[in-house]
Image (spheres, helix red, strand yellow):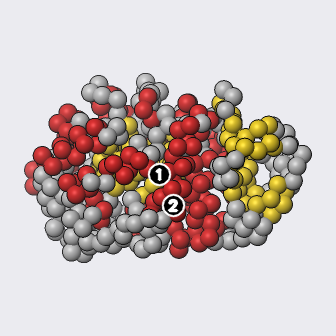
Amino acid sequence: MKNLPNVQHPAWVKDAVIYEVNVRQFTPEGTFRAFEAHLPRLKELGVDILWLMPIHPIGEQNRKGTLGSYYAVKDYRAINPEFGDADDFRHLVDAIHEAGMKVIIDWVGNHTSWDNVLTKEHPEWYKHDYKGDFIPPIGWDWSDVIVLDYEQQGLQKYMLETMEYWIDEFEIDGYRCDVAGYVPTDFWVEVRRALEDIKDVFLLAEWDDRAMHYAFDMTYAWELEEAMQQVAQGKKDATAINAYIAKVINSTRLTEIQMTHTTNHDKNSWEGTVFERFGMAAETFAVLTYAMEGMPLIYGGQEVGLKKPLAFFEKDQISWGDHPFNSLYARLNKLKKDNPALWNGEWGARMLPLKTSNPSQVNVIYREKEGNRVLALFNCSPDPVTFTISDKLFGGTYKSFKGRNTVELDESEEMQLGAWGYEIYTAR
């Protein structure tokens, strides 16, 4: 590719936390208007970017289940009537902005429903088999969608203009792009340039290839999520986390933000809740996603200990109430904003893994930015541990995240953590 851009993140990204909204399952009504009632709570929780799962009409031909998949888009320029109409969506976007938050919508650029309006208007914009028929994506059980052909310049023009439309017409702040790596990176680069002419946008790629950062603000930290799950299930030990950290330090720029997470809509619906996948380590690894470089994700309901996989093709419901995770996430979000070492991208600090006497059990992460310091300790095992830290970088006065008290840390002292225990010490 020629003339590769250097993505400039919007200033409001610096300490942001992202929150995924499953509109259908968020409220009994499953509408934009009903979701608005949650905005004060989400603002108080401390999230900044609301990512709405696809808001477009869902295809009926070859539909899965009763209501179908949000990712089987029937019309890119329309709104799912189950959620409301254009006025309802505009009202929601305005309310989000009035609350001081940003909003991005899910964009499914690789494939459409079988009955998308484009199948009649521009069948040549799709890939076809040897018989001339539309084809679903290869390698997945996605029988309810068919693949677009980005070799067609007309398709690229249509998609770009449609992405501009939602920003012009409704003033959204960007997109989360589904299976972004299945669409040519050149196209995304052109999208970035065009959308930046309208406003400061935020683009999230569902992908983890470095090339995506020529167009996107953020990609997925899939490798971290996989490593954490394997550690939690006893398939790997703490060295898997340090291996991930080493890879990030050695092969990425600090400006390349990754989204750290323990769950999302796919993980929850198809692989189980965080408690099923992480067991007793669920809280520990939730905290780890905040200590790492990257922007943490909270999936809707995760803050109240979502205890069931949400149905994907049917109406289901998040059970709202209080849970220890609610105050945990609120405190983590405040911690992130209060200490610049934990900020995103170039605003934050690189993470440095410190050597310990128990590398198979313990991960220690140190980050420092202009006098702001973070020392994060994690026992990634089901057994209590006593350990020392070999790298002598961190001595001084800190505030304990868990104890909320001030402590003096001596670089030579022994430290202790309980089973799946953690602690974060901060100084500024």
Residue 133, image x, y percentages: 20, 63
The mark found on residue 325 in the picture is: 2
Q: Are marks 1 and 2 in contact (CB under 8 Å)?
A: no
* Amino acid identity at mark 1: Leu
Q: Is residue 392 left or right of residue 293?
A: right
Count of picture labels: 2
Viewer-closest of 307 and 426: 426
Q: Quadrant of residue 69?
A: bottom left
Residue with the mark numbered 1: 297
- Is 427 placed above or below 120 here? above
Which of labels 1 and 2 is toward the front? 2
Work out whether residue 107 or residue 159 is closer to the camera in this orientation and state it.
107
SS of the residue under disc 1: strand
The one nearer the camera, 118 or 40, is 40
Asked if residue 1 lies left or right of residue 391, the reply is left
Residue 192, by quadrant, is top left
Residue 179, percent from left and from top: 39, 53
Residue 14 at x, y percent in the picture: 49, 33
Res. 113 visible in picture: no
Q: Is residue 297 visible?
A: yes
Please provide percent x and percent y for residue 75: 16, 53
The image quadrant where one finds the N terminus is top left
The foreground one among 303 and 275 is: 303
**What amino acid is at disc 2?**
Phe
Circle 2 SS class? helix
Cα distance between the residues tagged 1 and 2: 14 Å
Q: Residue at x 43, y 50 (%)?
A: 45
The single residue placed furthest to the front in the displayed view is 405
Label 1 crowding class (10 Å Cα cut-off): few <14, some 14-19, many 20+? many
Q: Is residue 200 left or right of residue 262?
A: left
